[in-house]
Image (cartoon, helix red, strand yellow):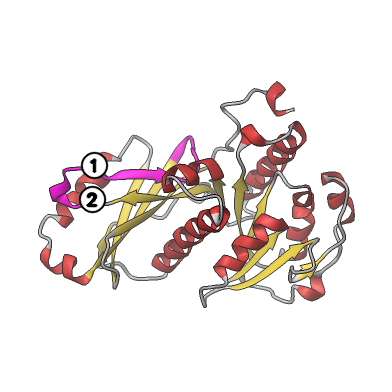
């Protein structure tokens, strides 16, 4: 898979994906360390109007491509021009939303415009899927983190989650009841499900990376080591009971169990919607 990061945040996450052999990462930014360096512009609108033609540096077609960007940055104004230049591919987007409470009015407007347009692209089928990730929700799932290395930890959590889901999507589960998401459900987020041992008597806790609303499809990917698969007689009951507990009217809930070599059990998950996600905590005046 090709991974294309646009802007500083996008480039850093693309670089984190490159640690896995399945990905070929490209970073596009105004900084010289980027794979492709473009001219710095003064505004969101300037990047849209003057985004350079870099087709000769993006020599791939008919590939699976993941584009990563954060809408609050000025350079995200060029995202549609970038998508035009790689349109002969199967494109997904990983969209990063920074903490809204720390954004300026201009950044909030940029974020809203880019996020909404990309969601409409997904709904129309131009994109395979858009994964929405909110920094504050990822932070909440990880707990306290030191300032040094903060974003490295945050980025790695996002990359590990999406990478593992990608691997499981291309792996045959030992058991499961996978239901393909509705064709119109192309707006998604990812998350982690905590799996305590039964003797801990603690519930399975979901930590989603975005507060997705109007959910239509949910998929759980369980990674279990061989010893537990062979010897834990309660595992199947606990998994199926949890999955059943999440079933709601008009929501498809499915799961798969996969054998891993890791000692710890884990579960990553995706939920999908066909409804454009808008700001719920801020009114139009707050956004700008």
Along the horizontal axis of the image, is 133 left or right of 49?
A: left
Point out residue 30 in the picture as x, y percentages from the top left corner.
Answer: 81, 61
Q: Residue at x 51, y 48 (%)?
A: 188
Q: Which residue is mark 1?
A: 203
Point out residue 246 in the picture as x, y percentages from the top left corner.
Answer: 30, 40
Q: Which quarter of the figure is the C terminus placed in? A: top right
Spatial distance from mark 1 to mark 2, Cα to Cα? 7 Å
Residue 48 vertical placement versus 57 (above, below): above
Point out residue 45 in the picture as x, y percentages from the top left corner.
Answer: 85, 45
Range drawn in magenta: 197-215
Q: Which quarter of the figure is the N terminus placed in? A: bottom right
Magenta stretch contains residue 148: no
Where residue 43 sits, quadrant-wise, is: top right
How many circles with numbers are drawn on the protein? 2
Q: Are marks 1 and 2 in contact (CB under 8 Å)?
A: yes
Point out residue 148 in the picture as x, y percentages from the top left corner.
Answer: 56, 55
Q: Badge 2 local density, few (<14 within 10 Å), some, or many (20+)?
A: some
Q: Check residue 196 in the rendering and tell me which mark sits there, or answer none.
A: 2
Magenta stretch contains residue 204: yes
């Amino acid at each position: 898979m090709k991974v294309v990061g646009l802007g500083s945040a996008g480039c850093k996450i693309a670089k984190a994906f490159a640690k896995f052999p399945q990905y070929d990462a490209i970073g596009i930014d105004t900084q010289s360390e980027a794979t492709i360096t473009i001219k710095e512009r003064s505004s969101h609108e300037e990047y849209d109007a003057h985004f350079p033609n870099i087709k000769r540096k993006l020599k791939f077609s008919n590939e699976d491509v993941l584009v990563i960007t954060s809408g609050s940055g000025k350079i995200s104004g060029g995202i549609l021009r970038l998508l035009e230049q790689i349109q002969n591919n199967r494109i997904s987007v990983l969209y990063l939303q920074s903490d809204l409470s720390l954004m300026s009015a201009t950044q909030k407007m940029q974020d809203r415009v880019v996020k909404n347009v990309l969601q409409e692209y997904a709904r129309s089928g131009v994109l395979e899927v858009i994964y929405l990730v909110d920094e504050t929700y990822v932070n909440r799932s990880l707990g306290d983190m030191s300032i040094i290395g903060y974003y490295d930890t945050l980025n790695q959590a996002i990359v590990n989650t999406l990478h593992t889901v990608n691997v499981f999507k291309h792996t045959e589960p030992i058991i499961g009841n996978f239901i393909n998401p509705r064709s119109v459900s192309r707006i998604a987020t990812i998350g982690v499900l905590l799996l305590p041992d039964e003797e801990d008597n603690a519930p399975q806790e979901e930590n989603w990376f975005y507060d997705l609303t109007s959910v239509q499809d949910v998929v759980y990917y369980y990674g279990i080591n061989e010893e537990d698969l062979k010897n834990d007689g309660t595992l199947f009951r606990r998994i199926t009971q949890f999955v059943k507990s999440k079933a709601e009217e008009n929501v498809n809930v499915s799961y798969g169990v996969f054998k891993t070599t890791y000692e710890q059990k884990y579960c990553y998950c995706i939920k999908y919607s066909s409804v454009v996600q808008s700001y719920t905590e801020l009114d139009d005046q707050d956004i700008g």
